[in-house]
Image (cartoon, rainbow, N blue to C red):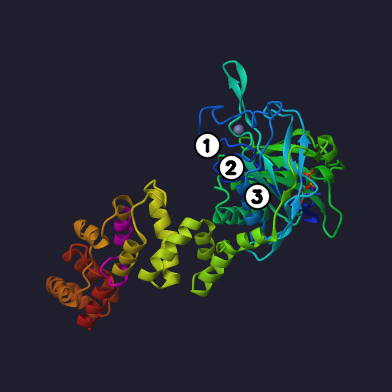
Amino acid sequence: MQATAKTSAPRTGDAAAWEPVLGLEVHAQLLTKSKIFCGCSTEFGALPNHHTCPVCLGMPGVLPVLNRQVVEFAIRTGLALGCAVRETSVWSRKNYFYPDLPKGYQISQYDLPICEHGGLALPSGKRVRIRRIHMEEDAGKNLHGEAEGSLVDFNRAGVPLLEIVSEPDLSSAQEASDYLKSLRAVLMYLGVNDGNLEEGSLRCDANVSVRPFGSNALGTRAELKNMNSFRFLRQAIEYEISRQIDLLESGGRVVQETRTYDPQKGETRSLRTKEEAHDYRYFPEPDLPPCVVSADWVAKVREGLPELPAARAARYRALGVGAAEAATLTDERPLADWFERALPGYPDAGKLSKRVVNELVAAVRDAGETLGSQRATPETFGELLRLVDAGELSGAAMKEVLAELVRTGGAPREIAKAKGLTQVSDAGQTEAAVDAVLARAQGEVAKYRAGKTQLIGFFVGQVMKEMRGQGNPAVIGEILKKKLG
Ligand code: ADP
Ligand code: MG
Ligand code: ZN
């Protein structure tokens, strides 16, 4: 539980008597080159209203033309999430008025969505049912506080979205966060979404209710919006659960409404009462034929599915990778791919996974780089680890070499040499240093032999100094013990 004093509402009664129930609605922007119903570019960051045309501006008399890639991505996602793909799905108009919606309606899918009845396994093993996945168009973006008041940018209008709706199967903030994380990983593996919560290309609304433990009925829910990080998602849900429990225990009622999370205050607050489906006056879109998907097409998409994160994690586990490392590696596909490319050069998968997850990730972060921009290759990283195993580099020296390696690239052995970090494990060289130290420290040698064996640390330190810090402590200790009898 991540809640701080600031983010959890005061609790009066017995919170343990209540069971939280959560269902998530996730909107994922699809990584198509063009918009869903016109040829405009979906590229992010253009000047406002430069990626627009009469279709996505909602001019009278225009007709939408469906982008086939959108349907393919929807099938891909549906199959990866174990859904049934509907052969003939139907487009609907969802009517509402808002300045960022030029037509006055959004083209979406309603009662006959393209995918239904799937599920997603959490790392805990729990399976969360997925109710439906449908395709729709995104709205534009209102820009408030501009010189002339508020402006609207329609570059995003008509960008394709998938809406992925779970059943209310989640029962804590952590579980909701785990679900979103797993879903995000799947979407990124499939190449249908970039997983960017901060920029809003992956958005999540959480429906939150509580009910007395043991009850089967669902409580009244609030829908939380505006959570653009995993941490905010957890905080908002924690706060909302506490708020509802307090309300119910003090004799109040939860009202069905849409609430927004304010990360500064650590609170959710009401935006509007919840709209019902009939408020949108859904009806079938007359300008688009139903979306027909052949069994052949579905079969072809199925053949092209990549190995998904859960399957990959299981494969790594079988190679001897720990559960935590397998989860971290497979969270983001590039890291897993990098690990796999390092494996031939360093086949101890368990050890390699720990070094990648701990040392490499930390070094890349500390250098202010990303996995894509840093300079260590899977091959040079394996070389570095082999130097440590051979006793040529200490653990501390390895970190120093790696820090340089991720910044500049190059050969680990050369970097270690240039920095004077190579460790001398050679027995002859070490023995000479030990002899020199023992000859100088006759008094301590006598005390050691008389039983003051804790002096061993002193001797190791002296030998290390004699070897200008490049000795191998294990080799030094061994030779010392032999010589001191
Ligand atoms: P709407 O389309 O009006 O938002 P839905 O009934 O389609 O409503 O549900 C949307 C989401 O809310 C789903 O993820 C569902 O699991 C979740 N949900 C529905 N009822 C509850 C409830 N009582 N408590 C928590 N989540 C709920
Ligand atoms: Mg909803
Ligand atoms: Zn357009």
Q: Nearer the viewer, residue 483 or 447?
A: 483
Nearest-to-viewer mark from 3 and 1:
3
**Could you say where residue 15 lies in the image, as x and y percent from the top left?**
77, 52
Neighbour tally class for label 3: few under 14, some 14-19, many 20 plus, Cα within 10 Å? many
Q: Give me the disc on residue 364.
A: none
196 vs 376, left or right, is right
- Magenta stretch: dominant SS? helix
Q: CA distance from mark 2 to mark 1?
A: 10 Å
Image check: 318 left or right of 174? left
Left or right: 72 as drawn, with respect to 249: left
**Amino acid marked by disc 3:** Val
Q: Which residue is mark 3?
A: 71
Mark-to-mark CA distance, 3 and 2: 18 Å
Residue at 35% of width from left, 58% of height from top? 377
The verdict on label 2 being within 8 Å of ligand 3 is: no
Q: Measured along the vertical axis of the image, is residue 380 above or below residue 23? A: below
Q: Which residues are magenta?
A: 388-403
Spot occupied by residue 128 in the image (x, y as percentages of width and height):
71, 59
Foreground disc of the pair 2, 1: 1
Q: Nearer the viewer, mark 3 or mark 2?
A: 3
Q: Secondary structure at mark 2?
A: loop
